[in-house]
Amino acid sequence: MRHSGYVDYPKRLQRRRAWGRKRAALSIAALTLGVLLGACVGSPAVAQTVRLFDGQGGLSASAVQAFAQDRDGFLYIGGHAGLYVSSGGEFTRVDVGDHGNLTDVSALAASEASDQLMVVAHDGVWLRADGAFRHVPLPVSGRRMRVAAFAHDFIVMDERGALWRVRSRKNEDPLVERFALTAPGNSTLIDDVALDASALGSLAVQADTLWMGCGGGALCRVRNGALVVFGKQQGVPSETWNALTAAPDGGVTARGATHLLRIGVKGDVHAEPLPSRSGNVGNFRPSFVVEMQGGSVVTSVGETLMVRSPDGAWREMDSLPGYGRRDVTAAFVDRENGLWLAGAERGVMRVAGFPFWKSVSPQGEHAPSHVSIVHREGGNAVWLATSNGLFRYTIAEGGDLTTPLAHYDIDVKSMVRSTDGALWIVEKSGTLLRLDVLTGRVQRLASLSSLTGALDVDSAGRLWVGTMTGLVRLDDPVHPPARLPRPLSLRDRRVNALSLDQFGRLLVLTDTVLFRQKAAEDVFDPQIDVEEQGIGAGRLMAVSTNNDVWIAGERGGVRKVTLPEEGEATVTGADGVHGQGLVQALFRDSRGWIWMGGLQGLDILSPSGWTHLDTSSGLTSNAILPGAISEDDDGTMWFGTEGGLSRLTDPAHLPALPQLHTRITSARLGSVDLLSRPMDEAEGHQELRLEYVAPTFVGHGSLRYHYHLMPLDEDEHETSAMFVTWPDMKGKQISFDVQAVDVLYGRSATAASFHAAQTKGASFTTRMIVWGFCSVLVLVVGGMITFRAVAAARRRHIEQAVRGRTRFMEEMQAQLRQQSRVDVLTGLLNRRAVCDELESLMNSIGPDDLMAVALIDIDHFKAINDTLGHQGGDFVLEQYGHRLRQGSGVGAVPGRYGGEELIVVFTSIPSVQALTTQVGRLHELLREPLVYEGHEIVVTCSIGLAVRIPGDTPGRIVGRADRALYRGKRNGRNCVVMAD
């Protein structure tokens, strides 16, 4: 099986790459927070993460006038240059088959119940259904039409205000009929009596509710065939409502020349004047209004964009990089809550995370950079710890930082506030400072040992300080001494993190042990051996509201530690964390949520489970700075990243991501399109090419596709490519199943299937004989017999296909259950799976049975990557995985422990001597020469081996093997070392 390449558009919609399609000029504007020191006002806020589509086949050369998104997630854009579509990447132009390209697209509507799409273009109205475009035979013409998907049909409003219902028909032109409206009492309304047809305005639809602007400044609602008019008597201002957006609850938000109107699902009316801009609220060019999830409304006022928050406050839209707010002519909200904006000669842009995420651009010579800590002073002041000093700012209305109040040349590593309001700061040089925020006085405290940055204040107001040689306590931080006292506890241990549990007891994380404070305040009991957890030296710690302790190590990964009041602590992994390697920041907020930051964004543990956030969600940059997660007094979260400072408001109400749908966009055998033509038309052996995609603008690059192509290939495959090819198709039927999995956000898409089979054969010959010699009764009878035989054969084939399909689906479900257990590169069990197997084996074998764990580390693996590249490194890991599967022996469980570390669990061992012999042979096998790109290379490894002893737990036996491994690495590598 071969697979490669990139497919990002529905093939049935795109046949030609007209205009020599340019590569998308995609810009991720990750904009940072900062303020010019000494300026009178702060820098303007900017949209958090902006993605520009400004160089694609005419998108930037003409005005975009319409947006639509179908049920599968494909996004369509219509404008003067034509119709375009995207599934999460670049946009491609759509044609209508034999009719060529559409131009001057003025309106779009997509069905939420099917893949149908309606387009208003220069040459009329078109309806796409079942992958084909058909012209809609409306009795009227004109470009100024409004369209909306309504239930399973479409509603068209023509230039005169007349309404038409359009319904698709299989293999026929769409059915067009007048849309009948009934008033209460079921009497039919006559347009020119009940409604002013010439004044009918925009359309908006939500589920089974249709809203439209009516004559006399009224709004009309159609639900279940009944019409209700909202006019002056209901409190609706008398003006033309030429921009509508339907609310998720069935209500509507309408935009007029001077007012914004909201009508709820129960008919409650709320109207308010638009804020004044440029002296004339009615002086606006674009006519649009959109409502975000959460209730924020975006519309144009004067020559700027305005945002109305759910509490009724208005503010200007954040700045748009490379895009003036007055340039926006159309807006749209996709199903993943992305805000799309379009302007003439500007292309289109997608703003992620709006309005929850925000950032402020740094300006000026002394503007803060690499913000790592945000500390709210109370009121409207905030402290920022940055790589170029400590800043104090005021916070303006709306949350923007404005006037800088102070700047201190302090390189902050950590910071905490004591009960008297003073800031206690550990510098990166390891010195402790006390900053009096009222006077600005800075006091330095000398210390016998360098500080690690661990700080905390307990309920009694005492300050706890972690040093390289133990734990220090200041009983009176208000009147501190000139020098820190000697460590009172945990002497000769490096204290890396401090945290208080839910009972006020201090937890202390050192390189090797997690301690908990006893009732006697200076006594700390060891709880777990961090070295046994496989994460390296302990570095970070956070305590959840249910008293679970989360720790992160210097080698990556996190562990959850449950500390009961009686009995031993238990340690588990972080199931549900997606793609997080080295953890840079670990934080618990006031809601009790755990926030974990690394180099791939954020992972958050809330009561609903783990959630992932990154730049496609609204984060400025995926690279979180060490320790750079903070919380404001009002629950706002702050994140320092390599690209700047991100601020997230109201995390509890972030919209959930919708269901993904896998869609097969093309199936071709040679030149034959199998989606629309029979397989029989392909002559001889041809290349088979299948294309598929799961449309999404969030996590698009993290999708993996699991597919099965029967009967050509019995194996299931996984790939990031969006097509698969089979070079020499010889079979007479294919059955293809594919499902997308978002490995970063933890989403599984609905699966898609495609089946095709040749049908011509004896029945075709029989038909030709019957047509040529229909007068010969014998041949007719023979043809009938042959036909029945073929029909019976077809039924058998169908039954076999159904049985095969059933078996395949059962196999696929089993494989999907197992896919999270297998490391894709090596083919071995992944870390979680092998640890589960180890725990299960240790619980099931007898006390006298021998069992061992071997940890294998590939020697000088970084040098291999540097010399051969990452592809060479992947080749070495792949070969090691193959050799481990072949040479580990009966009863052994091999796996990938992480990075270049592998693990083997040995059972069914007759003796320790036999084990050492077996491991020695495995070591010889692993270091045999490899051939990479025609060159022979020798890659050695070091092995740490631990045999189970009484009292061993899974963590302890792995920890002993790990320590033996490191002894071997210190002794020169390329050896096997037995644990003590």
Image (tube, grey):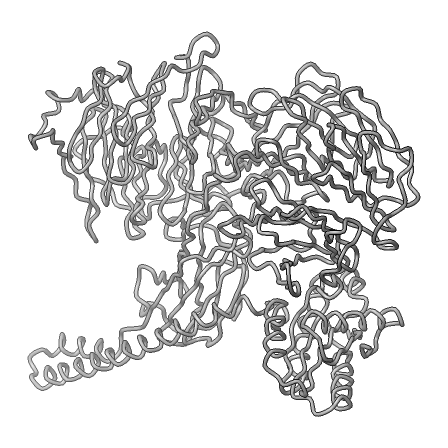
Which of the 4 image quadrants contains residue 482?
top right
Q: Is residue 318 left or right of residue 680?
A: right
Q: Is residue 976 left or right of residue 804?
A: right
For image coordinates 79% across by 25% down, the residue present is: 436
Instruction: Farthest residue to the front: give it.
Output: 520
Which of the 4 image quadrants contains residue 387?
top right
Task: Tell me where residue 970 appears, x and y as whole percent.
Answer: 88, 69
For image coordinates 47% across by 27% down, the residue present is: 343
For image coordinates 76% across by 59% down, the residue present is: 513
Task: Tell me where residue 207 appears, x and y as whole percent.
Answer: 28, 40
Q: Quadrant of the C terminus?
A: bottom right
Task: Tell me where residue 96 appears, x and y as whole percent.
Answer: 33, 45
Whether 723 is drawn above or below 806: the answer is above
Q: In terms of depth relative to the viewer, which is nearer, 791 or 418?
A: 418
Whether 903 is drawn above or below 357: the answer is below
Q: In terms of depth relative to the viewer, which is nearer, 336 or 760?
A: 336
For image coordinates 35% across by 63% down, the residue present is: 674
Q: Is residue 828 left or right of residue 810?
A: right
Whether 370 is drawn above or below 560: the answer is above
Instruction: Farthest residue to the top: give it.
Output: 279
